[in-house]
Amino acid sequence: QELADIVRRMPKAELHIHIEGSLEPELIFAMARKNGIELAYPSIEALRAAYAFTDLQSFLDIYYAGAGVLQTEEDFFDMAWSYLNRAKADNVIHSEIFFDPQTHTARGVPFATVINGLDRAVQRGREELGVSASLILCFLRHLSEADAFATLEQALPFRDKFIGVGLDSGERGNPPEKFAAVFARCRELGLRRVAHAGEEGPASYISDALDLLQAERIDHGVRCLEDPQLVCRLAAERIALTVCPLSNVKLAVFPELGRHNLARLLAAGIVATINSDDPAYFGGYLNDNFTATFEALPELGAREAYQLARNSFEASFVPDQIRQGWI
Ligand code: HPA
Ligand code: ZN
């Protein structure tokens, strides 16, 4: 009980949150009504009941459908503002927020509408909530590299509104090498780089994300334990993994939380962090992820709680001067 309190109250950074995955059913229904969009579910309860996933793709189908209600700059602001308030309640003092522009531009929503709405929430979060936040643009890996390049082109006029790029969506069959050229271009532009790897895909996708995309952080990465040499490399080079325990159980990466490998990752010296991924879909925000995981894994104690919080600041992309003050 005391440990759960420490875990909830300690300041943390969140480094793996898809803003479209923070869209609660209540907001989906409110925006659908406002924007005159017909939903495939008759009620909030029916929509929530459909959140029974068997794997990553079964989640992505519902997640992209939910994001279809977002139309105006106000909608993107409201979504991010709601998340930032929720994050503050969990003592998140810094968040690096993923967004999926292609999900919206493919529906005819201008890139400017998406990023201006999100950026307004980020600015207001800093001023009114004291929560620091930045945006990371994710390319959808089930689409082509040419599509990613076109998205990057649309994003460049807004270069000051995002700090880096990531890679998400269906992992299997969409290896890092597919996006090597666009990530090389992003690196030239001074953008920070992360990639989802080793969630459903093999450990080799983690090495390839490091070698071929120059990824600085790996999202999920839990399958690294299948490759002992890779584990040594991640630990030695202090390459952080942004682990999402509740997500991993909902998408059947692990059969139950008690079988999660987070304690083993930490014991191996890996800079692992805890994150919420898509909190509206996976049953919890950051503190829910912390408390459920600490309850399920008896190996985790106060030392690990402190380590996880420290790791989240060490692995963040804030300027070195601020980061040093945090760790
Ligand atoms: N994996 C891949 N793509 C995603 C995820 C995820 O966990 N969440 C939102 N898009
Ligand atoms: Zn994710």
Image (spheres, rainbow, N blue to C red):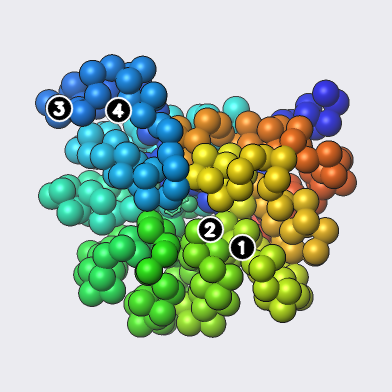
Q: From the viewer's perspective, is residue 144 above or below residue 1?
A: below
Q: Read off the residue under disc 4.
A: 28
Counting residues from the start of the chain, the first of labels 2 and 4 encountered is 4
Q: Secondary structure at mark 2?
A: loop
Image quadrant of residue 239? bottom right
Disc 4 within 8 angstroms of ligand 1 (CB): no
Counting residues from the start of the chain, the first of labels 4 and 1 encountered is 4
Counting residues from the start of the chain, the first of labels 1 and 2 encountered is 2
Q: Secondary structure at mark 4?
A: helix
Q: Amino acid at mark 3?
A: Glu
Q: Quadrant of the N terminus?
A: top right
Image quadrant of residue 146? bottom left
Q: Which mark is residue 199?
A: 2
Judged left or right of residue 80, residue 209 is: right
What residue is at 30 percent from the left and 28 percent from the top? 28
CB-based contact (under 8 Å), mark 1 and mark 2: yes
CB-based contact (under 8 Å), mark 1 and mark 3: no
